[in-house]
Image (cartoon, rainbow, N blue to C red):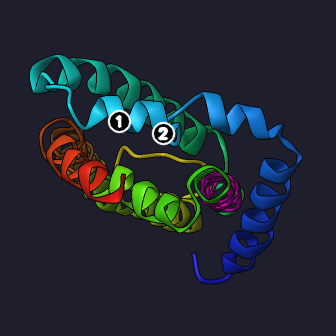
Amino acid sequence: MKKEQWVMIPAFLIGIILANLAERELFMTSGIFNTYYLHQYSWRMIDGNRLFCHILLERGRMAFLIFLLGQVMNGKMFSILMQGIIGVTFGFLAVASIVNLGARGILIAVGGLFPQWMFYLSGIVYYINCRKEQYAIVPSGSRVGNLPAYLTRLVFLLMLLMTGIIAESYVNPLLFEYLAKIVK
């Protein structure tokens, strides 16, 4: 992943440009950076079990899509694509948070991503490195001789995903509720 790090900064800048091209009303009326939403969130009781089911479906879908992309693309192209998507997303998120809430927006954005994204990003980086390593060793993608290592990596990735989902369902709402009350 070291050789493709040049992708992150241009992708981040593209995310910033895209967010600046978006209408300001988009940021003011929708999403977690809406002040009305933040006010409502700070007084609402979150059902972690329902949230867990929702997040499991949403993150499971995205993880499956990322897994499929990693399987059909070679390791280097997959690495560039994923770093680009992450860079654009965080650039857009940074502008969206600042435009609507100013400096408080950065705190809200970080609070909305913590702690689950530590696990999600770790899983993505690990999967990127596994795909690049596997592609370098066996370009055809054959896993027959390396099935135990492949299954071990898959289980580890699933554990990271599930830990992130649990953190997003049960830990993040508590932290975000506390942060929303402070930052108001």
The type of residue carrying mark 1 is His
Q: Of residues 95 and 113, which is closer to you in this image?
A: 95
Q: Position of residue 147 (x, y in %)?
A: 28, 47
In the displayed orientation, state which residue is furthest to the right. Answer: 21
Q: Position of residue 59 (x, y in %)?
A: 38, 32
The residue under the point 49% across, 68% down is 133
Measured in 3D between alpha carbons, the distance from the residue under mark 2 to the one under mark 1, in whole angstroms, is 6 Å
The residue under the point 31% across, 62% down is 118
The N terminus, quarter of image: bottom right
Q: In this figure, which residue is indicated by the disc labeled 1?
A: 39
Magenta stretch holds residue 94: yes
The magenta stretch is 78-95
In-image side of 107 versus 56 (left or right)? right
Do the numbered discs 2 and 1 sit on residues whose CB atoms are within 8 Å?
yes
Q: Of residues 20 and 161, which is closer to you in this image?
A: 20
Q: Of residues 49 and 77, which is closer to you in this image?
A: 49
Q: In this figure, which residue is indicated by the disc labeled 2?
A: 35
In-image side of 176 versus 31 (left or right)? left
The type of residue carrying mark 2 is Thr
Q: Position of residue 152 (x, y in %)?
A: 20, 52
Crowding at mark 1 (Cα within 10 Å: few <14, some 14-19, many 20+): some
